[in-house]
Amino acid sequence: FMDAFQFIKDVDIDWIQSKYLLAEPGEYVVIARQGKKDGQWFCGGVTDDNARTLEVPLQFLDPEKTYEATIYADGDDADYKENPQSYKIWKQNVKSDDILSINMARGGGFAISFNEI
């Protein structure tokens, strides 16, 4: 599980700005935050007890730059009651005009860190 804690080690604790990307009260929310330390962006989302796939827009990123996104998400067999420890981590290059399709298990969520490349 130590690889899953890398996000906690990386994430800033003071923010320049926060942006609410997607939200449905009582159902889900997706927020992007920019850290004060070096301007790095982080994004996270949570869902209620309904599994769902969200299309997360990355328009908050600088349109002139490319980023490596490290995505921490629910595993394919994740479930908050049946299999709460199932997760997967992957990296992909993204730009501000990209949209990430993220699957969330019941009671699940995701976290993403963005590093300029």
Image (tube, rainbow, N blue to C red):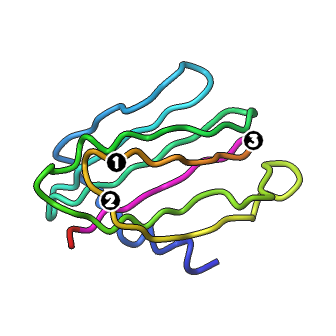
Foreground pick, 98 / 114: 98
Q: Which residue is mark 1?
A: 98
Residue 109 located within the stretch drawn in magenta = yes
Identity, as a three-letter code, of the amino acid under mark 3? Arg
If you read the primary sequence from the N terminus, does the residue marked by circle 3 or circle 2 appear first? 2
Label tally: 3
Q: Which residues are magenta?
A: 107-115
Q: Residues within 10 Å of mark 1 (few under 14, many from 20)?
A: some
Magenta span includes 41? no
Q: Identify residue for label 2.
A: 94
What is the distance, in whole Å, between disc 3 and disc 1 at their CAs? 25 Å
Residue at 51 percent across and 43 percent down: it is 45
Kindly identify the amino acid type of the residue bearing the numbered disc 1. Answer: Asp
Which of the two residues, 115 or 13, is positioned nearer the viewer here? 115
- Circle 3: element type: loop
Measure the C-alpha gap from mark 3 to mark 2.
27 Å
Residue 87, percent from left and from top = 67, 65
Which residue bears the numbered disc 3?
A: 106
Q: Are marks 3 and 1 in contact (CB under 8 Å)?
A: no
